[in-house]
Amino acid sequence: MTAVQHLTRARARRVALAAQGFTDPEHATPTMRTFERAVRRTGVLQVDSVNVLARAHLVPVYSRVGPYDVDLLRRASEVRPRRVVEYWAHVQAFMPVDLWPHMRHRMAAHRARHEQDGPRWPASVEADVLAEVAARGPVTARDLDDGTPRRTDHWGWNWSRARQVLDLLYRTGEVAIAGRNRQFEVLYDLPERVLPPAVLATPTPDPDEAARELVRRAARSHGVATAGCLRDYYRMAPAAAATAVAELVDAGELLPAAVEGWERPAYLHADARVPCRVGARALLSPFDPVVWERERTERLFGFRYRIEIYVPATKRVHGYYVLPFLLGDRLVARVDLKADRVTGRLLVQGSYAEPTGPEAASGRGGAGAPTTPEVADALALELGRMATWLGLGSVVVAERGDLAVALAAAVAHHRIG
């Protein structure tokens, strides 16, 4: 039986951050190779339409490689040979194209559920929509809209029939996403016009093999994780994930581990790096894999994080679009950011320091924890770098938050904007 690997909380943090690419060497000018390396680390880039700062899928790459040309993502997803494609991987996300065959069992499950639930439209509709995509693609749902009235009984997405059919065909793999237009609308096309021929020709793995590959990739991206975190990375069924974890342990790819302060058993990827230090300085998107799973974030960093976008303004604790600030191997602050593109300013609407008390085991401080002035200084430099990347000329710090005074002074000291 493989011996259990014992990790302190600090060591587990460093393993997790290395797995996510925060110890990779920087490139003066990030290239497509740099971009692909970052995506290999994260596995997926979650897509979200909120654009108060930058599209969610753009920020994780920036956090890992620094200022980069966002056209790299457009080229990777829209220009042949495509390197990434959108699919329901974690949720809606960009994923490497070679993951497509391992998603086919998920596509088949979507089709089976649709057939089991019974028809929601005449049988000919799907064939008609597919024929239109084949003839006219890439197309948006609006291009195919037949004028069917949209629902008015729900607060959320009120899709037309064309949108509903295309969404099903996308989930079942009968159409693929070829890109997005300037309005961020999805452009659908046939898979054979989107995916590389080698990917389309790859035999479909059986469900067990696909599950092992998904857990394998999740483990590489996590470095160390509980079974629940491994399952959540690609939103897998509990039974399939548990079987895959057990099989990868038997194969020696996952090593049983115990992490300080974690109640549940953990698993360390056999090839995980264990760096002595992590020298990161990065703002993390609310949709960054480091903070996806809130319980894991709290266990690793002692950082309680909630997205407050859908919370009424009067009830928000930290703000609308709040980014954690990673310094070294700790989450030391959080800032509520907004890109004011009209005036060319990066607005820091709230800034908050995290506790850095004496208890290292809490994940919130301990030996080597940065002081408030050090946090403010590093954060000011990072905000200046982000503003430049976003094409904004200045950083403006509002008075809200216990870090605001120190941060405003640091911004002024560095003459940022």
Image (tube, helix red, strand yellow):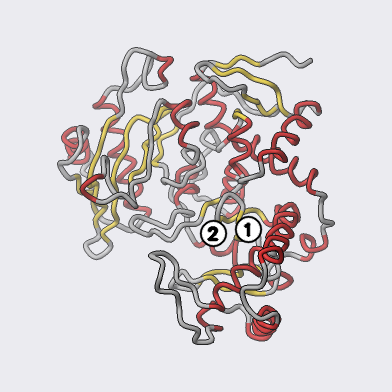
Q: Earlier in the sequence, mark 1 or mark 2?
A: 2
The answer to whether residue 403 is left or right of residue 183 is: left
**Which residue is labeled 1 in the image?**
84
Please rate how many residues cluster around mark 1, counting C-alpha atoms within 10 Å: few if below 14, some from 14 to 19, many from 20: many
Q: In this rendering, would 95 be left or right of 262?
A: right
In the rendered view, would you say 281 is above or below 207? Answer: above
Q: Residue at x 75, y 40 (%)?
A: 212
Residue 231 point in image, percent of width and height? 63, 39
Position in image of residue 61 (x %, y %) = 50, 48
Q: Position of residue 141 (x, y in %)?
A: 54, 77
Q: Which residue position is annotated with label 2?
A: 73
Mark 1 and mark 2 in contact? Answer it, CB < 8 Å: yes
SS assignment at label 1: strand
> How many marks can you see?
2
As measured in the structure, the alpha-carbon distance from the residue carrying label 1 to the one carrying label 2 is: 8 Å
Three-letter amino acid code at the position of disc 2? Leu
Which mark is in front, 1 or 2? 1
**In front: 354, or 342?**
354
Side of 383 where 150 appears, left or right: right
* Mark 2: few/some/many CA within 10 Å (<14, 14-19, 20+): many
- Please, is residue 136 above or below residue 412 in the view? below
